[in-house]
Amino acid sequence: MALRYSRNLKLQKTHFFVGLAISLLFTMIVAFQVFNLWVWQAEIVSRFLSFAEVPHTLSIWSTPARSPTFWIPVNSYPLPLMTAVVLVAILASFLFILSILRKIPSPVKTIAFVVSLVAIFTLLWQTIFQIEQSTTFLVTLDWSCSGVISLCLITLIFVPLLFTIRGPLWIKIFWLFLTIGFSVLWNLLRISFVTATLYYFGGSVFLLLHYFIGAFVDFIYIVTFYSLALAHLSKIETAGVMHFSL
C-alpha cells in the first residue's frame, strides 16, 4: 500500500515537472515571437473591424519597438435627453430587481452594481457635458492590450494547481492547451469588440469594457476551464476507484 502511494506521489511530481517545462517553453516562445503575434492579431482584428464597418487605419512598423496601432476616428455627439432618460430608467430598474433577488451570488451582484452605476454616470456625462467634436484615438496592441499576459498567467496557474493533482497527464495537457486556445480566440474578439465600441460609443465606454469587464471575463473563463479540468480529473479518478473496487 505504501509502495503504491509513493509511486502515485512520484507520478504527480513528474507531471509537475512536465507542466513546468511546457510552461517555460510556451513563455519563451511567446516572449520571442510576441511582435509576430501582435501583427497576426492586428491583421485579423482589422478584418473584423472592416466587417463591422468601422473606419480605421492600421499601422504596422517593421521594428518590434513600435507595436501595431489602430487609428480610429471618433465623432462624439451628446446623447438625446429622452434616450438617456429611458436608458437610465432601464438600468435603475435592473438595479432594483437585482437588489431584491436573493439567489444571485454576492460577487455577481457587486460586479453588476458597479457596471450599471458606471454606465449610468457615463450616460449622464455624455448627455449633459459632452460636446460635439471629432478626434482620432489610437489603440495599440501591446502587453496591456493584446492578452499576452493572460496567456502566460494560464500556464502559471495550471502548472502548480492542476499538474500536481492525481490523474492522467494527457487530460492536464489537453485542458491547458484548450484554455490557451480559447484565450487566443477570446482576445481577438475582445480587441475587435472594444475597438468597435470606441468608434460607435466613445472613449468612456471603451475604457469600461477594456479595463474592467475585459479583465473580469478573463478571470471568469480561466476559473471555469480550471474547474472543468478538475471535474474531468475527478470523474476519471472516481471511475478508476470504482473499477478497482469491483
Image: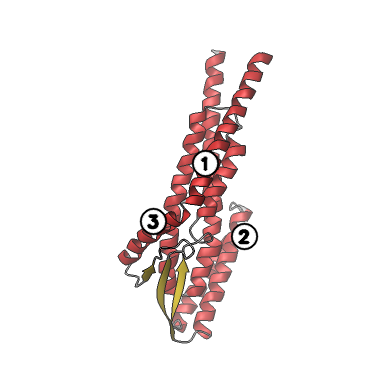
Q: Position of residue 196 (x, y in %)?
A: 40, 68
- Residue 203 is situated, as x and y percent measured from the top left of the image, at 49, 74
Q: Secondary structure at mark 3?
A: helix
Indicate which disc, 2 or 1, sits on the residue closer to the N terminus: 1
* Label annotation for residue 42: none
Residue 228 seen: yes
Q: Is residue 94 above or below residue 15?
A: below
Kindly report which numbered mark, 3 or 2, lies closer to the viewer in this rendering.
3
* Element marked by disc 1: helix
The answer to whether any part of residue 100 appears in the image is: no
Q: Identify the disc placed on residue 110.
A: 2
Q: Return the mark for residue 40.
A: 3
Nearer to the camera, 104 or 211 = 211
Mark 1 surroundings within 10 Å by alpha-carbon count, few (fewer than 14), some (14 through 19), many (20 or more): few
Disc nearest the viewer among 3 and 1: 1
Indicate the amino acid at tag 1.
Leu
Number of residue marks: 3
* Position of residue 71 in the picture relative to residue 17 (left or right): left
